[in-house]
Image: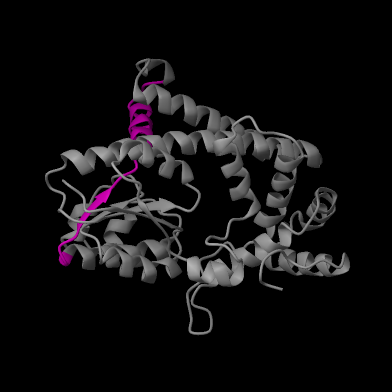
């Protein structure tokens, strides 16, 4: 397929992103999703399988987004769009899980294969995550910060490999997939997959066009094209500078511990008064946490531990007022 151009669209799996995504997708012939291949996907697109039935055999973190997204993809498929699920790292990971389910173990994975490389990265990622969870149960804030940095480092490593594999397979689709439609290609990407851009530039004839689906709202509430919380910034730092350590990483990790305590967890539906509630909340929670210094994060974290999110949000707001500080960004 000779593509007329590639659009790399950065987004999140939140319902408010679907309207701008739909408008942009309709201007492209081929749509490449950031998700692994799932059973029943093509049957769902062809309306041979109900959306709700399809979702019961898949694993989606955000059910409202998944349901509305599936309905949108059905419409686009009916309009003649070529739609592909593309996340080869996750496909390989699923195959490894199935391999283990069949009674095999890590030592049975053939060395120097893609499966072995993915397993090694995933094993380090999981080990770091468990260490972080264990540290969160201790009363050592500095140790928790160190554990979070360690996990972010492994998360960045995982992201680099995932992006490299995705870019390689995407280039293959562009050049070898005879089913793909001639015309522009929409490539979906998560909000911090910037190493994907680097990998695409290495493989494509010309760089993709970048679009940030929530840019208009983000600039209004954050002053930049994307709202990135301290955890995202830390992961990005370690994506491009894997060995980075020191006060900058420690501050971002400390701020991230506050951020995750006060960020809204449930899916928020758009309304007339606020068509982008998640972006606005992300700006607020990131703004509060990134206004704090390291020792302030330590003090506030001890107060927030164990509190439900609504109470944590109120306490964080009061704490910021107490130290006479305003949130970072454009939301007061």
For this orientation, the residue located farthest to the bottom is 272
Total numbered circles: 0
Residue 305 falls left or right of residue 185: right
Along the line of sight, the residue nearer the viewer: 232 or 3:
3
Instruction: Give the colouring mode of the picture.
Output: one colour
Residue 192 at x, y percent in the picture: 50, 49
Identify the residue at image location x=34%, y=20%: 113
Identify the residue at image location x=36%, y=41%: 200
Residue 186 at x, y percent in the picture: 30, 56
Looking at the figure, which quarter contains the C terminus? bottom right
Along the line of sight, the residue nearer the viewer: 20 or 65:
20
Residue 294 falls left or right of residue 200: right
Along the line of sight, the residue nearer the viewer: 221 or 308:
221
User: Is 79 colored magenta in this rendering?
Assistant: yes
51 in relation to 150, above or below = below
Examine the rendering and report whether any part of residue 173 can be seen.
yes
Examine the rendering and report whether any part of residue 129 can be seen.
no
User: Is 96 colored magenta in this rendering?
Assistant: yes
Identify the residue at image location x=58%, y=56%: 228
For this orientation, the residue located farthest to the left is 178
Residue 324 at x, y percent in the picture: 86, 68
Q: Which segment did they paint magenta? A: 78-105
196 in relation to 308, above or below = above
Residue 185 at x, y percent in the picture: 26, 54
Identify the residue at image location x=72%, y=36%: 146
* Rendered image quadrant of residue 205: top left
């Amino acid at each position: 397929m000779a593509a007329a151009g590639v659009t790399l669209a950065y987004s999140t799996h939140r319902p408010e992103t679907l309207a701008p995504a739909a408008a942009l997708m309709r201007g492209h012939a081929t749509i490449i999703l950031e998700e692994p291949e799932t059973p029943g996907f093509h049957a769902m697109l062809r309306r041979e399988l109900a959306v709700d039935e399809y979702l019961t055999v898949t694993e989606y973190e955000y059910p409202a987004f998944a349901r509305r997204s599936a309905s949108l993809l059905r419409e686009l498929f009916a309009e003649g769009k070529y739609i592909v699920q593309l996340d080869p790292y996750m496909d390989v990971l699923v195959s490894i899980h199935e391999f283990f389910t069949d009674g095999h173990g890590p030592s049975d994975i053939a060395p120097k294969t893609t499966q072995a490389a993915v397993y090694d990265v995933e094993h380090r990622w999981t080990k770091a995550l468990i260490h972080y969870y264990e540290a969160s149960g201790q009363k050592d804030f500095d140790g928790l910060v160190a554990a979070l940095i360690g996990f972010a480092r492994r998360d960045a490593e995982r992201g680099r490999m995932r992006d490299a594999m995705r870019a390689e397979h995407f280039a293959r689709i562009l050049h070898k997939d005879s089913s793909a439609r001639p015309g522009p290609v929409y490539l979906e990407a998560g909000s911090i997959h910037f190493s994907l851009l680097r990998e695409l530039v290495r493989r494509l004839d010309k760089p993709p066009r970048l679009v940030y689906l929530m840019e208009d709202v983000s600039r209004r509430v954050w002053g930049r094209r994307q709202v990135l919380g301290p955890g995202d910034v830390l992961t990005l730092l370690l994506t491009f500078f894997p060995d980075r350590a020191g006060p900058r990483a420690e501050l971002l990790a400390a701020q991230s511990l506050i951020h995750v305590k006060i960020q809204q967890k449930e899916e928020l539906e758009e309304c007339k008064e606020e068509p982008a509630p998640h972006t606005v909340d992300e700006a607020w929670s990131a703004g509060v946490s990134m206004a704090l210094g390291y020792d302030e994060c330590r003090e506030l974290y001890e107060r927030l531990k164990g509190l439900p999110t609504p109470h944590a949000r109120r306490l964080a707001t009061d704490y910021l007022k107490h130290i006479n500080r305003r949130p970072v960004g454009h939301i007061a």
